[in-house]
Image (cartoon, rainbow, N blue to C red):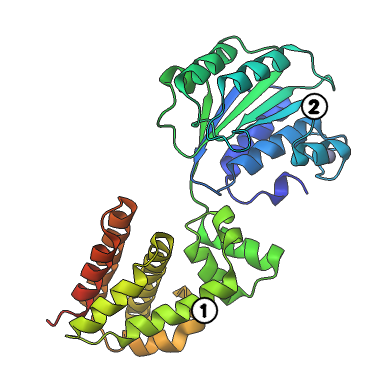
């Protein structure tokens, strides 16, 4: 284990490692980015590199210090999250942290606190944290983690060095699955496309179940015939049954239509995501025009946005499928 194992975010990593080596780490960082892209992992890795018994600017992942940080019980590395059964990080937790940061460290190295997610703090708690950021105790470092900075006091944000974590490139996710999880490459490609650039998301996906569901979705879409409005309405009812399932279906449908487009235009199997479904892609792309596919893609993207805005799910999906079977 060590920094070389980190997936993506190489610029942030290089910058942090240089600061680490030169002893120029800031007192406070704000890591911003979508769920599961690696913010917390990187925060833990920096903490490990500071405390690792053998790392020398890197970390081993297996010494007593690394293990205790991973387990969340290193005396100089505090992980601040909402307590069990609570939704917020409380002002008491922030005051407790303040008190602890003022004690000298057990190891003689930096005291670190990771607040995750920092956005679940009310105004009073944020103001308390602001005091710590304004007068940081010697040799302390705070890493604030959030999926977006909305709801954070501007004064709090401006006290931190902000690093934005984008979604991971698809090939990084699929390489991770193939090389470190032993996933078959065509399945890895598909899962990576469904992960929206989040390793956290891809690891929580049940691959077997998703593949099974995809088979079902392909059957549903392929069975829709031009002019068959009744079938479109029935299918919409099935697909709109559950919010997460609807979103997952739409995410997948977008990859499917993109595959049809890519194959129609290039006849290149290497660029398609649903590579294990190549024969269906060949068959479907021979029966459809480019204009039609483009309209399906924009319809799918629009439907996803509407469901995320909590519009009536059944209506959104039905609208999408009715357009799909509309005769032209
Ligand atoms: Zn170590």
Say whether residue 159 is left or right of residue 22.
Answer: left
Query: What residue is disc 1 on?
Result: 212
Q: Earlier in the sequence, mark 1 or mark 2?
A: 2
Tag 1 secondary structure: helix
Residue 141 vertical placement versus 88 (above, below): above
Q: Residues within 10 Å of mark 1 (few under 14, many from 20)?
A: few
Looking at the rendering, in which quadrant would you find the C terminus?
bottom left
Q: Residue at x 59, y 33 (%)?
A: 82
Query: What residue is disc 2 on?
Result: 75
Tag 2 secondary structure: loop
Residue extending furthest toward the top: 135
Q: Residue at x 31, y 56 (%)?
A: 307
Return the residue nearer the eye: 50 or 41: 41
Q: Residue at x 16, y 79 (%)?
A: 326
Return the residue nearer the eye: 43 or 290: 43
Residue extending furthest toward the left: 328
Distance CA(mark 1)–CA(mark 2): 46 Å
Return the residue nearer the eye: 74 or 134: 74
Q: From this viewpoint, is residue 20 visible?
A: yes
Q: Using the rendered view, name the quadrant where residue 233 is placed.
A: bottom left
């Amino acid at each position: 284990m060590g920094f070389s194992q980190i997936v993506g975010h190489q610029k942030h990593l290089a910058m942090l490692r240089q600061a680490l080596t030169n002893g120029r780490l800031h007192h406070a960082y704000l890591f911003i980015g979508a769920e599961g892209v690696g913010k917390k992992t990187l925060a833990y890795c920096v903490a490990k590199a500071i405390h690792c018994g053998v790392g020398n600017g890197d970390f081993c992942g297996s010494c007593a210090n690394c293990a205790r940080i991973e387990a969340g019980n290193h005396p100089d590395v505090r992980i601040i999250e909402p307590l069990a059964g609570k939704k917020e990080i409380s002002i008491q937790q922030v005051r407790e942290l303040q008190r602890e940061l003022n004690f000298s460290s057990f190891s003689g190295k930096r005291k670190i606190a990771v607040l995750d997610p920092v956005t679940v703090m009310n105004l009073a708690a944020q103001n308390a944290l602001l005091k710590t950021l304004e007068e940081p105790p010697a040799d302390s470092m705070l890493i604030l983690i959030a999926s977006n900075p909305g709801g954070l006091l501007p004064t709090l944000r401006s006290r931190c060095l902000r690093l934005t974590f984008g979604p991971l490139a698809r090939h990084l996710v699929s390489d991770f699955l193939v090389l470190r999880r032993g996933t078959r490459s065509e399945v890895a490609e598909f899962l990576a496309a469904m992960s929206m650039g989040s390793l956290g998301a891809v690891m929580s996906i049940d691959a077997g179940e998703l593949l099974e569901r995809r088979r079902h979705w392909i059957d549903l879409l392929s069975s829709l015939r031009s002019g068959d409005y009744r079938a479109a309405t029935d299918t919409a009812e099935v697909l709109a049954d559950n919010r997460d399932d609807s979103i997952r279906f739409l995410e997948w449908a977008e990859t499917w239509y993109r595959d049809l487009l890519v194959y129609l235009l290039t006849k290149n199997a290497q660029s398609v995501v649903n590579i294990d479904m190549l024969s269906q892609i060949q068959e479907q792309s021979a029966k459809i025009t480019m204009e039609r596919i483009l309209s399906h893609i924009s319809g799918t993207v629009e439907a996803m946005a509407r469901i995320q805005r909590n519009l009536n799910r059944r209506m959104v999906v039905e609208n999408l499928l009715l357009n799909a079977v509309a005769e032209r």
